[in-house]
Image (cartoon, rainbow, N blue to C red):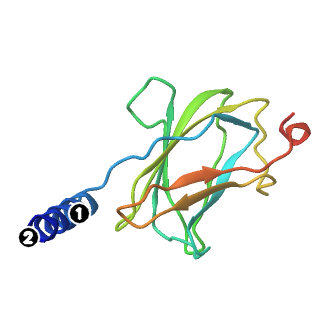
Amino acid sequence: MRTAAIAVLIGTLLLVGASAKATTCIAGRSFKVRQVCGQVRDLTGVAIPDASVKLSKKGESQAAFTEQSDSDGKFHFRHVPDGDYELRVKSKFFWDVAQPFSVRRSKDDNICYRPIHVVMKVAGQCGYVENAWKKKDLH
């Protein structure tokens, strides 16, 4: 009984310690876009304003583009040349999110036609980027 109580206490301390530090969760499969725009939300669909959204060329640590999500959690990078990138999103109290993707045949419209949906989880869980586009929509 005493051993079980000690194990529960250690597990709780490890969980609390892990949620106190931000980390980047494992990214999902790479995808292709024509525009780099979207919205940052939590698991319940609530927009996350003022999230740091950074875009880096693949293999480079320095961000090529940086902006904050607006009051609706939206972001939109303009004039992103074709290439391979990594999107990194950070917000207080949430795990960081990172996702590789490619920009092909870039399009700089003011309207975001195919938004990237960034879903962040409260620290202690992993966030992810979800895109449920059909293959025909990507070309």
Give the Cα distance between marks 1 and 2: 27 Å
Q: Nearer the viewer, mark 1 or mark 2?
A: 2
Left or right: where 19 falls relative to 108? left
Q: Position of residue 41 (x, y in %)?
A: 57, 67
Chain-order first, disc 1 or disc 2 = 2
Q: Position of residue 139 (x, y in %)?
A: 87, 33
Q: Is residue 48 above or below residue 118?
A: below
Residue that carries the numbered disc 1 in the rendered image: 20
Residue that carries the numbered disc 2 in the rendered image: 2
Q: Secondary structure at mark 1?
A: helix
Rendered residue at 69%/32% (across/down): 103
Rendered residue at 86%/38% (across/down): 135
Most distant residue in the front direction: 1
Report the number of discs: 2
Q: Secondary structure at mark 2?
A: helix
| Amino acid type at mark 2 | Arg
The reply to whether callout 1 and callout 2 are in contact (CB within 8 Å) is: no
Most distant residue in the right direction: 136
Left or right: where 30 falls relative to 126? right
Q: Is residue 9 above or below residue 107?
A: below
| Amino acid type at mark 1 | Ala
Rendered residue at 60%/51% (across/down): 129
The local crowd at label 2, few if under 14, some if 14 to 19, many if 20 or more residues have their Cα within 10 Å, is few
Taking depth in this image into account, of 67 and 104 the one nearest to the observer is: 104
The local crowd at label 1, few if under 14, some if 14 to 19, many if 20 or more residues have their Cα within 10 Å, is few
Rendered residue at 58%/40% (across/down): 28
Taking depth in this image into account, of 71 and 115 the one nearest to the observer is: 115
Q: Is residue 9 above or below residue 62?
A: below
